[in-house]
Amino acid sequence: MLTIYSDDHHLHHGKFELIDGQLTPCFEKPSRADMVLARAQKVNLGGVAAPREFGLEPILRVHDSGFVHFLKGAWAEWQAMGRDYDMLPFTWPNRRLRQTIPDCIDGKFGYYSFDAGVPITAGTWQAVSSSVNVALTGQAELAKGARGVFSLCRPPGHHAAADYMGGYCYFNNAAIAAQACLDQGAARVAILDVDYHHGNGTQDIFYDRADVLFTSIHGDPRFEYPFFLGYADEKGVGVGEGFNFNYPLAAGSDWSVWSLALAAACRQIAAYGPDVLIVSLGVDTFKEDPISQFKLDSPDYLRMGETIGKLGLQTLFVMEGGYAVEEIGINAINVLQGFDS
Ligand code: Q9C
Ligand code: ZN
């Protein structure tokens, strides 16, 4: 399987995030993607190609134009305030607050985010733009006929909605790739989100649509981030009703439990009959993951890939989370090797 990868992700390296009441070095760091790339090369997964440039047009098919331009100009605005350390938001338009876009950078950042897990640095715009190009280049390879392609995206994307970022995610790489498939003539795209966290951004983007089926297996939001979306009764709305399926699981879930949810999700995907499958591939379900509470082991990822492969669909794998850096390469590439087997 071909891997699409750009070194530009190194340009995004936030310093701190707020965890358990403490400013902690960011878990979402460049070594994550470096380790996945190293493993793909070590096992000869199937070559590595650089992304092509797609510009803003495919991003604007999914994201709000005000949001995109805020992100593009944010660092310059921050610097104009005489600030040269990482940007972080700290106030959000909660219930009964005005949904208004203030003039100042701190107000705008709050408006266009839902948590403080999204540091913006000097290189963030270049990194997030390249991450989208990595996803779109993978989609283009799929359109040319590949059975499976791996877009080694970093930063990840599935927590980002049309007009807000959060949870280490800025642009929703998987959603942008799905929309590109539709814009090139696909009738239906299925998304399978196997990251430990619910893909709230992806769900929100396609919630009122029938042309994208969204399925997600994740830590139950009653106890796990993102807390405010990802419950089993979220089925879609309007013409989108019946095209959204969440599988929230208890803390401590291992493969015996997780694989039942995967089987159920695969049945939904097969019944939908999509032209293309996009997998939001997070491996933070791993038993040693520092911020997660599932118990998958490295060989389980081979079985995960095999099960996905049995759907017999053209499949784009888009990298999302996974914070056990030592094993992230083995686990992510195991999914792809299982798929190819
Ligand atoms: N104390 C992805 O995996 N922070 N994002 C949790 C818990 C947010 C994860 C803090 C985790 C976001 C792409
Ligand atoms: Zn995650």
Image (spheres, helix red, strand yellow):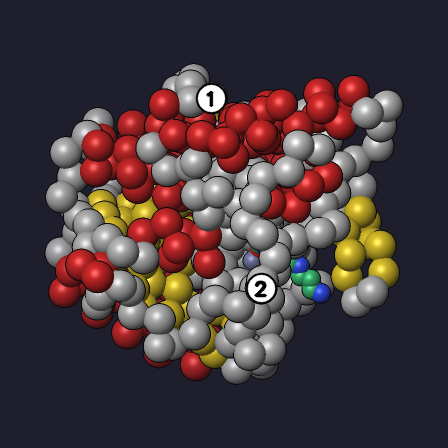
Give the percent coordinates (x, y) of residue 63. 42, 37
75 to 152, vertically: above or below: above
Residue under label 1: 50
Front residue of 258 and 337: 258
Comes first in the chain, label 2 or label 1? 1
Please say whether residue 84 is visible from this viewpoint.
no
Callout 1, which amino acid?
A: Ala
Residue in the image at 42% along x and 22% along y: 56
Front residue of 253 and 210: 210
Residue in the image at 86% along x and 23% along y: 82
Callout 2, which amino acid?
A: Arg
Residue in the image at 13% along x and 56% along y: 273
Please say whether residue 205 is visible from this viewpoint.
yes
Quadrant of ligand 2 in image: bottom right
Tell me the quarter of the picture where residue 115 sits: bottom right
Residue under label 2: 95
Give the percent coordinates (x, y) of residue 188. 17, 48
In the figure, is residue 5 to the left or right of 9? Answer: left
